Amino acid sequence: MKQTMLVQLYDFNLFSNFIFNFMSLYRVINSQMQRYLILLQLLLTSKYEIQKQILQIINICQLDMFFPFGMSNFKEQAEKLKKAMKGLGTDEEAIIAISSAHTAEERQQISDAFLGLYGDSLEKIMKKELTGKLEQLLVPLFKGRFTMWAQYINEALKGAGTDEDLLFEMIFLLNDQDQQRVETEYKKLYGKELKKAIENDISGGKWAKLIRAWLNAKNDSNTSPEFIADSLWNAAKGAGTDEQVFMQILANCKPEVYHQACEIFQNKHKKDVGSIIKREFSGKSEDAFMAAHYSLLNQRIAIARQIKLAYKGAGTDEDQLIRATVLFSDRVRGNELKEAYKQFGDVLKDTKRDLTGKFEKAVVSLWQM
């Protein structure tokens, strides 16, 4: 049965030598990890229709042993999602529960398993079954963190003008490892280099210079925390601000060194660096430099701040809250989130005050508030 199936696919135009090579490698390689990496590489370099067929082959041929990381569990979760969306009504709470119980990487595996089991895109089915803000929140969770990160950046760049706030939100929470992944995904999705796309879209203002410096930084400075603290103080002292000093420190300082420098600054001058940035910068430049400051100072607090910014003001920015939840809710959750949010208030209280219904339940569940 398996061989007949493969011969038929081999004859099919779409696959040609691909299937032959795939199965040849499967037979000769004993290491499960190597098998997994080969399949992953083939999937990442294939078009959607080929990906769909490959996953169907794995399901038909019962090649669960190909996956070393509990593929059977991902298939089980995919089956639960299918059941939740079957029939006249959608079990939204079941979808929320499955989404909340897994990381971004695991949700992507569940999406792949769903495609293999049913020959259909989980995204497409979820879009049919969900509506409104709940759809906008839950569907991207299964598309992959770095796919969504790249898409959000592209949203900031497309159209007549740059969405600076969205760009700050996306760029200044990139660490070195995330940036590499997002750059790869952006090139795959849009056929162009991320840095060039941003460079072509932004102006020459202070915030734009900071973004350029941030994206091209190596974060390998060996400058002492005390020297950095003194440099920041001197740059802000007097009638004018030496913006270049702030820019170079924020773009090139290692997070742990910057954290120490901020503590030294606070002890010496009884003021925190954030208050100095607010005093010395204004408008979009203040927003950009503050975002960079928080990201370097403490990534968890920077993420918590994104939630607070979504709740700030007369109305809730639900789109900003969705973006933060899609990208970071599996990285900072539960007590870690509550602790990080403390300087801004009570995260659960703010969430219950600003949100309602299933959307509120989903946000609370995903962040494990």
Image (tube, rainbow, N blue to C red):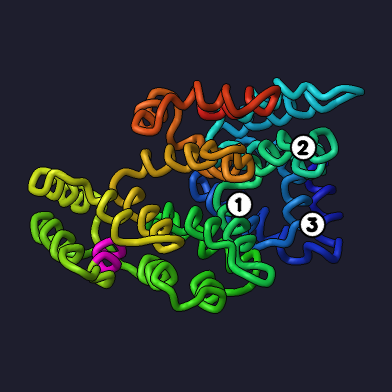
Q: Residue at x 20, y 63 (%)?
A: 236
* Mark 2 residue element: helix
What range is drawn magenta here? 246-252
Regarding residue 100, the answer to whether it shows in the image is no
x, y percentage for residue 215?
40, 67
* Mark 1 lies on residue: 148
Tag 2: amino acid: Gly
Tag 3: amino acid: Glu
Nearer the viewer's eye, disc 1 or disc 2?
2
- Dot 1 or dot 3: first in sequence order is 3
* Mark 1 residue element: helix
| C-alpha distance separating marks 3 and 2 | 28 Å
Regarding residue 58, the answer to whether it shows in the image is yes
Q: Answer yes or no: do the residues labelled 1 and 2 have beta carbons within 8 Å?
A: no
Nearer the viewer's eye, disc 1 or disc 3?
1
Nearer the viewer's eye, disc 3 or disc 2?
2
Q: Looking at the picture, does residue 349 appear above or below residue 58? A: above
* Mark 2 lies on residue: 132
x, y percentage for residue 357?
70, 22
Q: Residue at x 45, y 29 (%)?
A: 333
x, y percentage for residue 267?
10, 43
* Mark 3 lies on residue: 49
